């Protein structure tokens, strides 16, 4: 076996047992979620199975927008006879939103690399040390004695690159991920194309919006936390297409002394999404979990009901136990 993330035998049996698989991802999907779903569906179809891709969306990220037509927002009617559901890039059906409707009674398997998440039963292939779910899907394909097709390899590399910031977030423990990347390249995946998919084709509005978000950013707790936000007015002027979170986080995290970054977006009146990033010391998944969110120790997020100012105050307060000392204070 080549891979470092070996799936359990019962998961291999799960993918032999049924004729049809509903492949579900989380709300507000990213490249890792979408790439994993598409690659797994392709592999199962090559093995003679039916595979139905389900996602609640929205596909607002420019790098995944072209894939939206491959997904249904939920199942139509009753599940097919002899079917099962696979949930990727999250460990809970709740994170899938309306995409999970009608699938609750099916045999379930969860494939995830987030440490947070409720155990809802079913098979669980959850490996928090994996840098992306695409690594686990690749490991699954290889565990069957197969190799990803060229298209699958492209999708898997794309997902790995998006979740690792094109390998920026990998450290000295990442040799297995680089070995898996080499096998994807051997199968025909192009790092150059993956980078272009991630970073090319951004609308001019995204750069204008980024300038505004940087100009209103606040340095808190002695500069160790930087927070910015996007209100309904920016939403009206730029729309969803103006978003480019990864580049925004990159720029914020280059500031001297910063340990964590927060970006709050008001989606509609009384409803916000919050994204967290950490350099090393702060476990932002634990902070997100206080509000019902989750993710990784260094990258997490949540959906929160409340007006923008209320959400800002609550999030800032949540960081107080982490950052408060004799020298720090909230600006």
Image: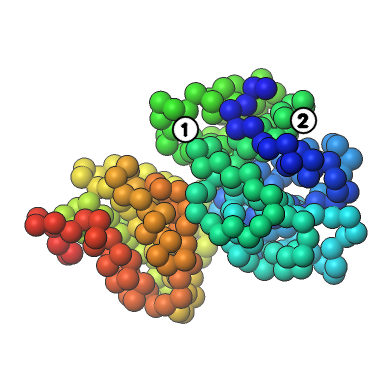
251 left or right, relative to 161: left
Of badges 2 and 1, nearer the viewer stands 2
Tell me the quarter of the image containing the N terminus: top right
Is there any visible trace of residue 162 in the rendered image?
no
Residue 176: percent from the left, percent from the top? 54, 25
Quarter of the figure with residue 279: top left
Residue drawn 9% across and 55% down?
Answer: 327
Q: Which mark is residue 167?
A: 1
Residue 94: percent from the left, percent from the top? 60, 65
Q: Choose the circle earlier in sequence order: 2 or 1.
A: 2
Residue 111: percent from the left, percent from the top? 64, 46
* Relative depth, front residue between 266 and 278: 278
Residue drawn 27% across and 47% down?
Answer: 259
* Relative depth, front residue between 192 and 28: 28
* Relative depth, front residue between 110 and 203: 110
Is residue 197 placed above or below 80 in the rendered structure?
above
Quarter of the figure with residue 216: bottom left
Dot 1 surroundings within 10 Å: few (below 14), some, or many (20 or more)? some
Tell me the quarter of the image containing the C terminus: bottom left
- Pointer 2: what residue? 144
């Amino acid at each position: 076996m080549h891979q470092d993330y070996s799936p359990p035998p019962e998961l291999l049996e799960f993918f032999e047992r049924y004729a049809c698989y509903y492949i579900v991802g989380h709300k507000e999907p990213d490249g890792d979620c979408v790439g994993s779903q598409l690659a797994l569906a392709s592999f199962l179809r090559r093995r003679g199975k039916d595979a139905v891709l389900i996602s609640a969306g929205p596909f607002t990220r420019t790098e995944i927008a072209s894939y939206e037509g491959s997904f249904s927002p939920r199942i139509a009617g009753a599940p097919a006879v002899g079917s099962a559901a696979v949930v990727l890039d999250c460990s809970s059906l709740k994170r899938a939103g309306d995409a999970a409707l009608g699938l609750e009674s099916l045999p379930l398997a969860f494939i995830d690399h987030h440490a947070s998440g409720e155990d809802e039963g079913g098979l669980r292939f959850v490996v928090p040390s994996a840098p992306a779910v695409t690594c686990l899907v690749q490991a699954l394909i290889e565990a069957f004695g197969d190799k990803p097709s060229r298209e699958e390899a492209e999708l898997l590399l794309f997902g790995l690159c998006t979740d690792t910031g094109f390998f920026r977030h990998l450290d000295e423990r990442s040799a297995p991920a680089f070995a898996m990347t080499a096998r994807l390249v051997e199968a025909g995946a192009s790092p150059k194309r993956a980078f272009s998919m991630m970073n090319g084709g951004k609308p001019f509005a995204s750069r204008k919006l980024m300038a505004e978000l940087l100009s209103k950013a606040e340095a808190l707790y002695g500069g160790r936390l930087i927070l910015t936000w996007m209100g309904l007015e920016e939403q009206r002027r730029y729309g969803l297409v103006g978003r480019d979170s990864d580049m925004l986080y990159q720029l914020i995290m280059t500031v001297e002394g910063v340990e964590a970054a927060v970006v709050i977006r008001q989606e509609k009146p009384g409803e916000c999404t919050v994204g967290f990033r950490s350099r090393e010391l702060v476990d932002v998944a634990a902070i997100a979990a206080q509000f019902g969110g989750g993710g990784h120790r260094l990258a997490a997020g949540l959906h929160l009901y409340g007006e923008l100012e209320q959400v800002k105050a609550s999030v800032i307060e949540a960081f107080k136990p982490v950052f408060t000392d004799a020298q720090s204070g909230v600006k």
